[in-house]
Image: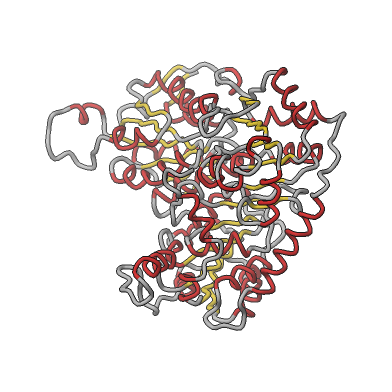
Amino acid sequence: MSVKVYERILDLFEAEGINTLFGIPDPNFVHLFRLAEERGWNVVAPHHEESAGFMAEAVSRMTGKAAVCIGTLGPGLANLSGAIMCAKVENSPVIFLGGQRARITEQRVRRGRIQFVQQMALVENSVKYHASIEYPEQTDEIIREGLRKALSGTPGPVYIEYPQNVILEEIDAPPVLPPEKYRLVGQTAGADLVAEAADLIGSAKQPVLLVGHGVHTARGGASVKELADLMACPVIQTSGGTSFIEGLEDRTFPYGFSAASIDAVVNSDLCLAIGTELGEPVHFGRGRHWVANEANRKWILIEQDPTSIGVNRPIDVPLVGDLRAIVPQLVDALKDSPRTPTPELDGWIKQEAAQLAELAETAPSGMSPVHPARLIVEATKAFPADGIMVRDGGATTIFGWTYSQAKPHDVMWNQNFGHLGTGLPYAVGAGVADGGKRPMMLITGDSSFQFHIAELETAARVGLPLVCVVGVDYAWGLEVGVYKRTFGHDSLETGVHWSKETRLDKVAEGFGCYGEYVERDEDIAPAIKRAYASGRPGVIHVAVDPKANSEEMPSYDEFRTWYAEGQQ
């Protein structure tokens, strides 16, 4: 059949179950945007291309599929570059499409070309694959290669460029192939290694499941729940894998920030790691809390990229493939011989619950401005049980992972790259993927929130049930703390403060959202309730104590061990 190139692009993505795109329409892509909307796609134009990239990344995390983002030629691609780098470090399979001038313009040796830069060189070190469509007939092979590279091995972004002279061409195209006809889908592990892993699990006295970011982004929680039930052991969250699996909330402990997690890790004789790179935040699986009992501990790693096996630490049984296929293999191997529950498990569950209750009780209250620990307690107590949680910020996130009273099943935050400002775009993308059905809460600091604050209008336009709880200290709180620790409390803190006249609730109202100002802890939860009831995206501006925010960050010493240069 004869189709336009832009039609064929949509056909190829639809075969992968993709039906959402983000971007500010490049002149090269206006036909594609219009056709996508006619076909019923979610087409969302934000206010900044970087936001578009973050939104697409959130859709990928919420669906377990690749996502699509489009950038206009020249400055649009420059704006996208931060989101492209973020997707690479966060292992997110986002397909970035970029417009470009016609090849005759690019190849000429002339100065003063308008809205032009060599875009491939700009992004080549931040993507798994990059290509330019030189001829219309290349569309199928290059789009498929992009999807193949994005979704194979360690997932990640790709960049595909469409020069102006190509995208409107017409081609004769065969029927679209389903994914399994052109790339590996659902790769399983060898039966011998699955049996060996099952034997190790069966003989272990104190195993732990180490669950990372990849379990959430692969949407693999249900099968991991089955495996955890058969193993009857504690679940240890990595700092990136903080989405709780439904049914495992009580026995899931955050690595390093929970006494129960440290005790379980120190005493473990087997670790089954799923969806994690075993990177710095877990001390590569061999430093800090893992040192004790290292000689007696076996390791099983489920990993999609074979070249990563044994890089960060030795692995006894590598299970290479898609965790969505391998975890069910382990479930089948163990279903007739479930383990007797680890004797200490009940005690750890009680210890974890007591620690959370104590934190809620002891977080300083009655202060105005509000203590940031109390902000987290009050906000997370008000978090809807079925909600989507989004995190952003430096000091705010550090307080959050210690004091949070919520155990959400979907958590969005930028852990690996540490890119501030992702929170609001992530929330928009997650809400679009969810269809706006579930309530969302963004807990962030004022510094991070202001990166992409214009996307409040996007959230309002799309009609998302989002409440943004913003801790406002009128400063880069984490950096203020660095100044104080480095130079002393009377030091000059250069470049980290701004006007205390800033009112983010008023900004929200200007974007058609609900806004409320809070400076007492007892008013936080009622304000959140009113924001949800308003039927509009809401911003709760919570004035927080700047001294506490910069000086009293909990578990900061543990956090700093992630950066122990050369020592792990």
Residue 334 lies in quadrant = top right
Front residue of 302/485: it is 485
- Relative to 464, say whether 227 is above or below: above
Residue 534: in sight, yes or no? yes
- Relative to 451, say whether 217 is above or below: above
Image x and y of residue 396, in percent: 52, 64
**Horizontal relation, residue 103 to residue 513: left or right:** left
Residue 433: in sight, yes or no? no
Front residue of 444/356: it is 356
**Horizontal relation, residue 78 to residue 421: left or right:** left
Residue at image position (47%, 71%) is 551
**Horizontal relation, residue 545 to residue 433: left or right:** left
Image x and y of residue 385, in percent: 72, 59
Front residue of 254/40: it is 254
- Relative to 495, say whether 158 is above or below: above
Image x and y of residue 235, in percent: 71, 45
Residue 348 lies in quadrant = bottom right
Residue at image position (62%, 50%) is 255
Residue at image position (44%, 71%) is 507
Residue 402 lies in quadrant = bottom right
